Image (tube, rainbow, N blue to C red):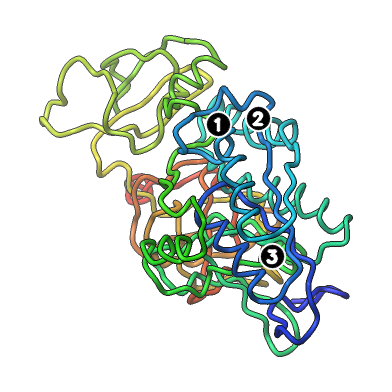
Amino acid sequence: MTDFPGAPDLHAPREGHRLRVLAAMSGGVDSAVAAARAVEAGHDVTGVHLALSANPQSFRTGARGCCTLEDSRDARRAADVIGIPFYCWDLAERFREDVVEDFVAEYEAGRTPNPCLRCNEKIKFAALLDKALALGFDAVCTGHYATVVVKEDGTRELHRAGDMAKDQSYVLGVLDERQLAHAMFPLGDTVTTKDEIRAEAERRGLAVAKKPDSHDICFIADGDTRGFLASRLGRAEGDIVDETGAKVGTHEGAYGYTIGQRKGLRIGHPAPDGKPRYVLDISPVNNTVTVGPAELLDVAALTAIRPRWCGVAPSGPGTYTAQLRAHGGETEVTAEPVGDELHVRFTEPVRGVAPGQAIVLYDGTRVVGSATIATTERAAAARRG
């Protein structure tokens, strides 16, 4: 890994170089505590809330997202309590283009995107970081649970959080070497429960201490992803077929389904064996959704595109663990970069792998990099071959 000239020591002692830190404050408890800890560490901190909607009233209310008017006000109140300057930056147009439109286009193409991962890549550690560096800040601080390890030679590695139960390194696996050099995660080495983080916020006088966490997609006001996509893409009735090609039902838009989905299939009659059926494939070309038994979901290998490395790219095949979704477990793989692709083979078949998802590779706790799944090889097909 090549260090960046002038990259700040983000773990400088209080008596050392005082960093200028831009704290991204979503209006939630984690980002507020992270900003407070950065101040406590002796850094010169400024808070910023990202306005990600041109019409925030259209986003959900009730303190469930990170883009509402309530969130902006909560972030401002937290900054006042912490005692730091606070600004609200309008990144709504960039967010619409890079996150929302990308989300819709991916579903339209039959893929399953992760908008939080895309937001980290394109907004928080691209648009926001670029603006921060241009204004003379040394680092962007967020409330993510992950750890930046600075090695003796000054290079940096991204690792899992100290507490695996709260680890968010998966959605940060898109950070490249330059972005990682200016990223600060004050909560990363915290081995405490979320209740203890809330208790810390309460001790600091932060009103967001009891604010609910957000688990939904921030730009979908009511949490109805299928309805949101229908409003953007329109309703397009098509066939639901089984693995033999026989029609077993209809749908109102193939974009409303994901690989591995079991509920909401709207199939009029049970499978011959009486077992549940799952979405096996989504074909936008003929607007068809294919369903079948769970064992046909088993994936033996995949090809991913647009790899992004948290350091130098691997030069050949290697053995790693992989994570395929934000709250999923790890599975052992062999992986090799081939041109602009990443070829991955699972030690044991896995289920529910969908094109569009991110695969993040780990070497122990270290994040090696990530890529977007393009195609999969089903275990059943591999056995037949």
> Residue 136, how many percent across, how many down?
88, 61
What's the amino acid at mark 1? Answer: Phe
Q: Do the residues labelled 2 and 3 touch (CB within 8 Å)?
A: no
> Residue 370, how many percent across, how many down?
59, 58
Name the residue beneath numbered marker 2.
53
Residue plotted at (66% across, 53% down) = 24
Looking at the image, residue 8 lies above or below residue 323 = below
Dot 2 or dot 3, earlier in sequence = 2
- Residue 102: name its quadrant: top right
- Residue 331: name its quadrant: bottom left
The residues bearing labels 1 and 3 have C-alpha atoms spaced at a distance of 25 Å
Q: Is residue 86 left or right of residue 270?
A: right
Q: Quadrant of the N terminus?
A: bottom right
- Residue 209: name its quadrant: bottom left
Looking at the image, residue 385 lies above or below residue 191 = above
Q: Looking at the image, which is closer to me, 88 or 139?
A: 88
Residue plotted at (62% across, 59% down) = 142
Numbered circle sitting on residue 183? 3
Label 2: which secondary element: loop
What's the amino acid at mark 3? Answer: Ala
What's the amino acid at mark 2? Answer: Ser
Name the residue beneath numbered marker 1.
219
Q: Are marks 1 and 2 in contact (CB under 8 Å)?
A: yes
Label 3: which secondary element: strand
